[in-house]
């Protein structure tokens, strides 16, 4: 199954170019040294939203970043496991409530990430 045959010739089609070729033929450099935990779009949105708010409830955060319940839950758990986000569960009456806060480690990681991205932007635009 690794080879695709063309309809006419029966020969294997050439393999698609790999992303690493775009990054200068160096697969390890493809990440550009970015924090993979934050770099994913939804997790970056979560960390950014929490950076400008002391805390947000699950519903507030979900609505702010436009996530689904499941998507937010999965990504918030990864950030919590990484030590970037603190999650507090409580009840308001009989209704469960989940609140998120950015930890000091999360804030420092976001600052490093933003500084790194700024450096990349400056290098690409030639503004060193």
Image (cartoon, rainbow, N blue to C red):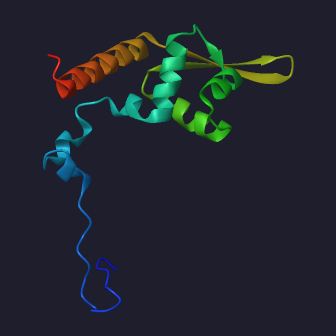
Quarter of the figure with residue 17: bottom left
- Residue sitting at 40 percent across and 28 percent down? 38
The residue lying toward the viewer, choosing from 113 and 101, is: 113
Give the x, y percent position of residue 68: 65, 38
Give the x, y percent position of residue 71: 59, 39
Count the labels in the image.
0
Quarter of the figure with residue 33: top left
In the displayed orientation, state which residue is furthest to the right: 93
Q: Is residue 31 above or below residue 125?
A: below
Left or right of 126, for residue 9: right
Give the x, y percent position of residue 64: 63, 23
Quarter of the figure with residue 112: top left
Figure quadrant of the N terminus: bottom left
- Residue sitting at 54 percent across and 18 percent down? 49
In the displayed orientation, state which residue is furthest to the bottom: 9
- Residue sitting at 49 percent across and 12 percent down? 51
Q: Is residue 3 above or below residue 92?
A: below
Left or right of 27, for residue 51: right
- Residue sitting at 48 percent across and 21 percent down? 47
Figure quadrant of the C terminus: top left
Left or right of 10, for residue 85: right
The residue lying toward the viewer, choosing from 11 and 3, is: 11
């Amino acid at each position: 199954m690794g080879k695709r045959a063309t309809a006419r010739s029966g020969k294997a089609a050439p393999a698609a170019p790999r992303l690493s070729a775009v990054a200068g033929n160096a697969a390890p450099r493809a990440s550009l040294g970015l924090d993979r935990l934050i770099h994913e779009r939804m997790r970056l949105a979560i960390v950014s939203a929490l950076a400008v708010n002391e805390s947000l409830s699950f519903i507030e955060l979900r609505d702010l970043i436009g996530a689904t319940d499941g998507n937010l839950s999965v990504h918030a758990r990864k950030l919590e496991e990484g030590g970037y986000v603190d999650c507090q569960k409580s009840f308001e009456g009989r209704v469960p409530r989940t609140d998120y806060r950015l930890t000091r480690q999360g804030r420092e990681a976001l600052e490093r990430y933003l500084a790194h991205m700024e450096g990349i932007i400056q290098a690409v635009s030639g503004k060193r």
